[in-house]
Image: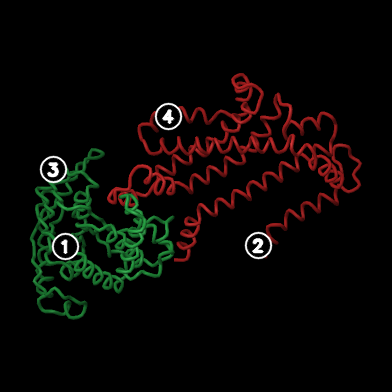
Amino acid sequence: MRRIAIALGLPVVLVAVWWFASAGSTDFYRPALSRILLAFRETWFGPRLFDDALPSVGRLFAGYALALVLGVALGTAIGAIPWLRALLEPALEFLRAIPPPVLVPIIILIAGFGDLMKVIVIVSGCVWPILLNTVEGVRGVDEVLADTCRSYRITGAMRLRHFVLRAASPQIVTGARQALSIGIILMVISEMIAASQGLGFTIVQFQRGFQIPEMWSGVLLLGLLGVGLSALFQVFERRILIWYHGQRAEMREW
Amino acid sequence: MLHVEGLSKVYDGHGRRTEAIADITFSVAEFEFACVVGPSGCGKTTLLRCIAGLLAPTSGRITVSGEPVAVVFQEYGRSLFPWMRVRDNVELPLRASHMKAQRRRELVAEALESVGLSDVHNAYPWQLSGGMQQRVAIARAIAYGPRVLLMDEPFAAVDAQTRAELEDLIRSVWQRLGVTLLFITHDIDESVYLGQRVIVLSASPTRVAEIVTVDLPAERDQLTTRSDARFAELRTQVYAQIQKAKRSTP
């Protein structure tokens, strides 16, 4: 109860400050919060929810899921095979250093203007933190546990599933958390260039059409989306890493 | 059952050549309980890792005629999978050997009962004390149904009382199970209390300094055995050998 109160405290104060500071505002570009909330209801509780917001979120999920699969699979292979790592590391460092937004025009050339392009943009940014963290996690597996697997003949898929991936899971989750915020950014960016629908496109449209309260309501929606996804992520993290957090809490007690 | 012939191990790395094991030869008979004791840093763990097949010897031959082989490591905290409950830890090697689920459950329950841990099936290893974690590791080895059991200083990291309990536990497990047991320790008293024979190693580069036969009765307990005059003689004999081995180090 107290934890919830502390977590909600600052957001409530900030919203209140915004509400009263902007009340009765006549500034065209900074409308009152009450005006923005009204626009929020009119804009997003209607066809735009299905035409713009949900497709955006769908592409985000598709790109994020693809990045997870790619990043974990490649990262596991690279982390487990030393010569593969030596071979790929310089190339990976180069690719990782390219900011994904500059790839958008190139990806458009290859994949056109549709959903595929947007999903590829999201994958191209999300995959790096997942991949690199997985490599580190797989490299750092405990030697005694590795010996245990060898002496009990735990090999192949079973070793991968019950030992390598689990041992690397704290790092994989760290990478996945970083990738989620990158994914939201890229979802918006991919819709700002040469798009005809989606959250990013809609916000730019509102801005160009001087529909300022509607534009602000889109920004608000993106913020809420981020908070919601991060809460969802935490639920999964708690389930996957229950052992990790428990073990660390136990160590602090000793 | 277990033969080590002319085993040597040289570590070559970073321009430094370290001869960990010079020449070790010994045998362990079927159903025997043999202890290996030696001064610290004499390559006891290297020896065990070679026998367990986790490390390739530089030269020499190791024959283990009896499958499967189970290993209990010193670092109990790192040899159990922290993401698995106790039951799953014990069961995993059995799943890897494609055993039927019904049979697996029976073996896991039996093994945990035989180490006195029937009530912690659902706990995670890190929720247990060090002694209990090592019991889980022993249960995992028992459930595996080994014919040869290798133990690498398994009780070095637990407190003295827990250690005495675990020593008696491993004696009773050995008697009931009928396994060939090779037990590595740095503790002279422990080696005499547990084993039928004590293989004394020299300091590095390691050789076998002496093999002492422990002619104590098969029924042993912490009070009477340890206060037995013969026990004192044997431990003195082993101790003297180790001192001699240390002095003769070049």
Spot occupied by residue B179 in the image (x, y as percentages of width and height): 19, 61
Residue A212 sits in quarter:
top right
- Give the distance between the C-alpha atoms of the residues marked 4 and 3, in whole angstroms: 36 Å
Dot 1: chain letter = B
Q: Earlier in the sequence, mark 4 or mark 2?
A: 2
Q: In what quadrant of the picture does the N terminus of chain A appear?
A: bottom right
Q: Chain of mark 4?
A: A
Tell me the residue at 72%/33% (across/down).
A198
Q: Are marks 1 and 2 on the same chain?
A: no
Q: What residue is shown with label 3?
A: B59
Among the 4 quarters of the image, the one containing residue A28: top right
Cα distance between the residues tagged 1 and 4 = 48 Å
- Kind of residue at disc 3: Ser
Q: CA distance from mark 1 to mark 2?
A: 56 Å
Write down which chain is painted green: B
Vertically, is B141 above or below B132?
A: above
Mark sitting on residue A3: 2
Which chain contains the residue that carries disc 3? B
Asked if badge 4 and badge 3 are on a common chain, one would say no
* Residues at marks 4 and 2 touching, judged by CB atoms closer than 8 Å: no
Left or right: A222 with respect to A98?
A: right
Residue at 66% x, 25% y is A114
Q: Is residue B250 visible?
A: no
Q: Is residue B77 visible?
A: yes
**Rendered image: mark on residue B21:** none
The disc placed on residue B35 is 1
- Tag 4: amino acid: Leu
Q: Are the residues under marks 3 and 2 on the same chain?
A: no
Instruction: Write down which chain is painted red.
Output: A
